[in-house]
Structures are given as structure tokens and as C-alpha cells.
Image (cartoon, rainbow, N blue to C red):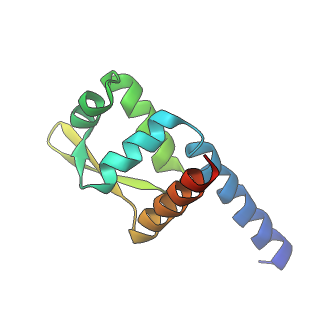
């Protein structure tokens, strides 16, 4: 893969992550998932979203590679995709707080 293609792929992924983080509901869901694995139903209740709406937001976070899902029976549980996502959330929080 050429350097140009690599950079284009990185920028495309950065745009996906940026899009996923550009919604307050998704940020709130990420905050709750960062506390530990949770089911879609739990997350919907915690965020006062419908299960369908929470599920759509979680799928966007999943497509961006920020969360991962695992199925247990009929329930789907979400957790952060890795510790680097915690660092990203913390960095965003720090920038947001200092710019208020």
C-alpha cells in the first residue's frame, strides 16, 4: 500500500470516528459503556432513548470501531473496543471543559 493510500485510509477512519462522536447521545452512550459492558436495553434506559434509537447509535459507534458487541442469548452487550477509546474520551472531555 502506498503512503498516499495509507494516509487516505487513516483520514477516512478519522472522519468515521469524528462522525460517530458528533452526537451527544452517542457520547453519553460511550460514557456509560466506558463504565463496563452493558446491554442495549440498559443503555436505552440510562440515556432515556428508545431501544431502537439506542441500538442505531451503538451501531454507528461500532462502525467507527469505538465499541464492540457480543451476544448472550437474545441480548446484545456493548463494551469499549479498547483502552485507547478511554484515552480518546478523556482527551475530548478535557478539550471540551477547557473551551467552555
Q: Which residue lies furthest to the left in this view?
A: 73
Left or right of residue 79, residue 53 in this image? right
Residue 28 % position (x, y): 41, 40
The image position of residue 10, as x and y in percent, is 70, 66
Can residue 59 be spotted in the picture?
Answer: no
Image vertical order of residue 94 relative to residue 25, above or below: below
The reply to whether residue 5 is visible in this rendering is: yes
Residue at the top extreme, as displayed = 50
Place of residue 8 in the rendered image (x, y in percent of width and height, measured from the top left): 79, 64
Residue drawn where x is 39% and y is 70% of the image: 83
Tell me: 37 left or right of 17. left
Please tell me which residue lies in front, 65 or 97.
Answer: 97
Residue 15 vertical placement versus 46 (above, below) = below
Looking at the rendered structure, the number of numbered marks drawn on it comes to: 0
Vertically, is 49 above or below 62?
above
Instruction: Name the quadrant containing residue 48.
Output: top left
Looking at the image, the residue that sits furthest to the right is 4
- x, y percent for residue 9: 72, 64
Amino acid at each position: 500500500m502506498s503512503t498516499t493510500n495509507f494516509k487516505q485510509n487513516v483520514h477516512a477512519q478519522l472522519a468515521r470516528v469524528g462522525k460517530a462522536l458528533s452526537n451527544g447521545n452517542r457520547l453519553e452512550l460511550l460514557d456509560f459503556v466506558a463504565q463496563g459492558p452493558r446491554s442495549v436495553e440498559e443503555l436505552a434506559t440510562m440515556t432515556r432513548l428508545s431501544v431502537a434509537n439506542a441500538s442505531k447509535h451503538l451501531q454507528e459507534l461500532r462502525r467507527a470501531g469505538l465499541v464492540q458487541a457480543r451476544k448472550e442469548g437474545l441480548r446484545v452487550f456493548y463494551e469499549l473496543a479498547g483502552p485507547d477509546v478511554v484515552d480518546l474520551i478523556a482527551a475530548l472531555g478535557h478539550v471540551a471543559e477547557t473551551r467552555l
